Image: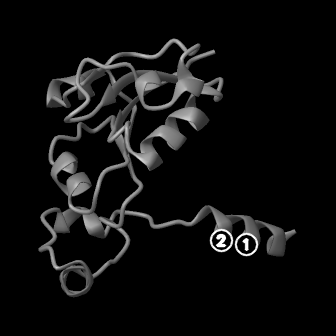
Amino acid sequence: MTKLNVLVCGSTGYIGIELVKILVRHKKVNIKYLCGNNSVGKNISFYDKSLSKKKLPVIRKFKKNLLKEIDVIFSAQPNGEAQKLSKFLLDKNILIDLSADFRLKNKNEYLKWYKIKHSAQKLIKNSIYSLPELKKISSKIKK
């Protein structure tokens, strides 16, 4: 069975840790890299003891050359960070952003609501915004 190689940016924040807990249970996912800024060199179990028995990589600084080995990048970082990350994507990479960077289709609305100029405006039109709760509801309605 082929597994997807995954990189998680922002792996030590609340959302990042919860994401890692979900991903370690997925049989088709290989967590190849965990990235952070202030946590470089530490194990994720330092932030959540429930992950201590899991075989996970040590946290490292994100570098664009890591993307050569990655299928899916999860960004669990603050607003604005996934936009920066998106500039390094290779054709084979898929970015899943857990912030609001690609939530709004209009760059002016993004500036209005988040007070940050959108730096990856060309990617907005190709992005998909989805809430799992809405997906569940819509799939139930279709049945």
Q: Quadrant of the C terminus?
A: bottom right
Expressed as whole percent of the image width and height from the top left, the position of residue 25 reads 65, 28
Between 53 and 95, the one lying in front of the other is: 53
Expressed as whole percent of the image width and height from the top left, the position of residue 108 reads 19, 86
Compared with 61, 90 (above or below) is below
Relative to 28, 138 lies left or right: right
Expressed as whole percent of the image width and height from the top left, the position of residue 71 reads 39, 31
Q: Looking at the rendering, which quadrant does residue 44 occupy?
A: top left
Relative to 133, 9 lies left or right: left
What amino acid does circle 1 point to? Answer: Ser
Relative to 76, 90 lies left or right: left
Q: How far apart are marks 1 and 2 (CA)?
A: 6 Å
Q: Looking at the rendering, which quadrant does residue 78 occupy?
A: bottom left
Residue under numbered circle 2? 134
Check residue 138 in the rendering and tell me which mark sits there, or answer none: 1
Query: In the image, what residue occupies the spot 38% across and 71% down?
Result: 103
Between 98 and 92, the one lying in front of the other is: 98
